[in-house]
Amino acid sequence: MPIRTEPITVNIGPQHPSTHGVFRLRVTFDGEMIVDVEPIFGYLHRGTEKLAEERNYTQIVTLTDRLDYVASMTNNQAYCLAVERLMGIEVPIRGQYLRVMAAELQRIASHLVATGFLLQDLGALGTPLMYCFRERERILDLFEMLCGARITVSYMRPGGVYYDAPEDFWPALDRFLDYMPSYLDELEQLLAENEIILVRVRNVGNLPLDRLIACSASGPILRASGLAWDWRKADPYDVYDGLEFDVPVGTNGDNLDRFWVRMQEMRQSLRIVRQCVEQMPPGPVRAELPLVLRPPKGAESYGRVESPKGELGFYLISDGGISPYRCKIRSPSLLNLTMIKDLLIGWKLADMIVNLGSIDINMGEVDR
Amino acid sequence: MNCSIGPDSLFHDNVLYRHIYNAIGEFIPSSLCWLDHIISGFLIILILVNGVLLGAALYVWLERRVLGRMQNRLGPNRWGPFGLLQPIADLVKLLTKEDLVPQGADRIAFLMVPIVVVFPLIAGLAVVPIARNTFLADLNIGVLYLVAITGLSTLGIFMAGWSSGNRYAMFGAMRGVAMLISYEIPTVLSMVGIVLLAGSMSLVDVVNAQHLPFIVVQPLGILVFLLGISAELNRTPFDIVEAESELVAGYHTEYSGIKFALVQMAEFGGVVAASAVASTLFLGGWSGPFLSGQLGALWFLMKLGFFVFLFIWIRATFPRLRIDQIMAFAWKFLFPLSLINIFATTLQVYWLRDDTGALSRGDLGLMAAINIPLALVTS
């Protein structure tokens, strides 16, 4: 005789150890199985888009820091690209290299956080997370040398970067580049040789490619399902077209692939940073611009980058004033989150947490 | 009425009890020796309860320190030398918290839980011998008693989950019942091998029978026992009952203040108790070279420390399994292994024992030589 069970509804979040911010899920369970999910967000809404209409173009850079706060550099970059397109500003080559270098370091830092929290969600109490954060700390130290801040960097400006890197930055970066590959080997070994991690992530949370494309997902979760789509290759900005790197692609689109793609992207980022260091020409780092930017009336532009989480875009409309008429942010976390029903329904509670962690959302960006 | 502890008395072998009894006897006329027995009995209980409390407190400190070191941070280091007074500070904080009972809770069951979970831990430790002839109680059914009394903790976990009126707690409780009952079987079966070897269920006899530590004679036994007991204690990789990243705090989500302290103490104290049992069953308890007599307690503490460290180490390193994987692991891996172990041990004991049923060091060595390759092949 089948036992009659009753589905129960559980609110997971907004305060929960592993919803990665103030994210709330109303989940209906049948036993341990998930039968329905309703995402509820907006708890971290700060009205960034509206605030941007009240700031001048340089001040908005500080707002972008606070979108995806584990990847501020790429936010800065996307916004600055949009403003530069709006006004037709030519960025000095050294400035472009510095931007790419900072953005790639940021990508490593962000992927380290994603990987660490994925392992934390798998139940490894703190240890792998702390190890990932230890390495991220080295990158944050480098950022501190670059611009004096660690998280909310505001390093980039429309027209280049704020300052050139100080003298002692370069040896520190060299040390980091020498050290990091061995650490990544270690981290990858931890994944590939731990039986428990493998049974937990392999063939769990598979995402079919057509669904991902239909949901306009982007970033590592798209590449993990087998499509080599990367804005750095598809529409190179700054100096990416002069740099050599590969786009790692997964096959199954499961949690293991997403984890693996991030690992490989960190290696590619190291490669890019190394090339930047070698190729960096001397010269100015920031275009000569007036103190207050006034784009022409009616100008529109869209600047996008491949942020660690996917396509991050800023759409700006100018009314000829000192601040934009409209600033629309296309945040990858929000659009990747539209996959959530495909990702969670039908899996167990324990898998749900890991699946949610594997798309690497950041609530600062989702709610804006 | 004569109740002095003579050579034929029930309590003569129990050095600890005899000493306490005689010390109190100095102040009490011999006609009131029944009072002496009562006072000594209560003193033994006092020692036991406070020993467990102290052990749990020390363990909390050790776990936080060792875990901190393994996680590349410092751990508590502010209160007292090396942060040793941290458990006291924690306790004071928890004691001063409001004593909350959630509105939807089943009040009586909710309030009983801390007692139900702490009791088996304290009662279970009573039968573990500390040094030669030094124990709190020597039951002739010691192992069975341990199994029975620690099985009660499952009840506590279920009561906590059910009575809290919280769905996280409910999830934890349902998972807990399924897992704890499954893992109890291989754990108990792994202890059967020890009983076969020792020919007795008394833990004192088990220690005396270990001419060779049973860990080498029962490699499969220790493997199954450690894995099973990790699950019983809700430690990683089997900590689905409280699964921090999934269920917040699992079955004790709603507990706060001193009730939380007691539930936590049951958990941390459980590790100490399990380590004590493991070192008694598999490492020979207080027996060891160089230190004899009552000093054997030092050996006991060292072995206990070894197992405690092992548990902390496992906690720091392993991620968690999913519930279906955990159940499959218990039934498809641990259960057959423990059966193989019992089967092999039974045959060996049958062929090797002498007329009195005892096994010599040579017999044990021979069994170790058979069982270690067997363990390597099967596991």
Image (cartoon, coloured by chain):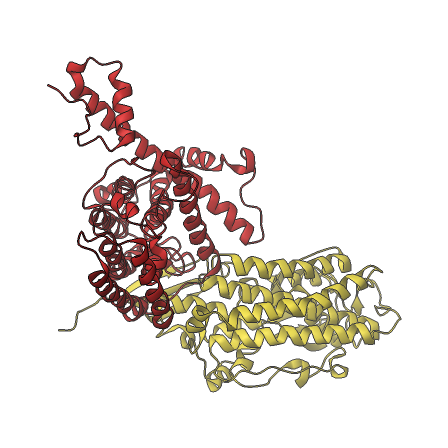
Chain colours: A yellow, B red
- Answer above or below: position of B202 versus A101: above
Residue at image coords 41%, 56%: B244
Question: Would residue B312 be found to the left or right of residue A281 on screen?
Answer: left
Which residue sits furthest left? B1
Q: Quadrant of residue B9?
A: top left
Residue B332 vertical position relative to residue B92 in the rendered view, above or below:
below
Image quarter hosting the C terminus of chain A = bottom right
For this orientation, the residue located farthest to the right is A283
Q: Can residue B18 be seen in the rendering of this structure?
A: yes
Residue at 31% across, 62% down: B367
Number of disc labels: 0
Closest to the observer, A200 or B96: A200
x, y percent for residue A19: 46, 61
Q: Tell me the quadrant of the picture where the N terminus of chain A can be found.
A: bottom left
Residue A90 seen in render: no
Quadrant in the picture for residue A330: bottom right
Residue A123 located left or right of residue B26? right
Q: Position of residue B168 (x, y in %)?
A: 33, 56
Nearest the viewer among B16 and B248 is B16
In this orientation, which residue lies closer to the viewer: A122 or B70? B70
Quadrant of the rendered image containing residue B129: top left
Which x, y percent locates residue B108? Answer: 21, 41
Q: Is residue A277 above or below residue B37?
A: below
Q: Which residue is more in the foreground, B65 or B130?
A: B130
Residue B273, position as x, y percentages in the image = 34, 45
Q: Residue at x 28, y 53 (%)?
A: B360
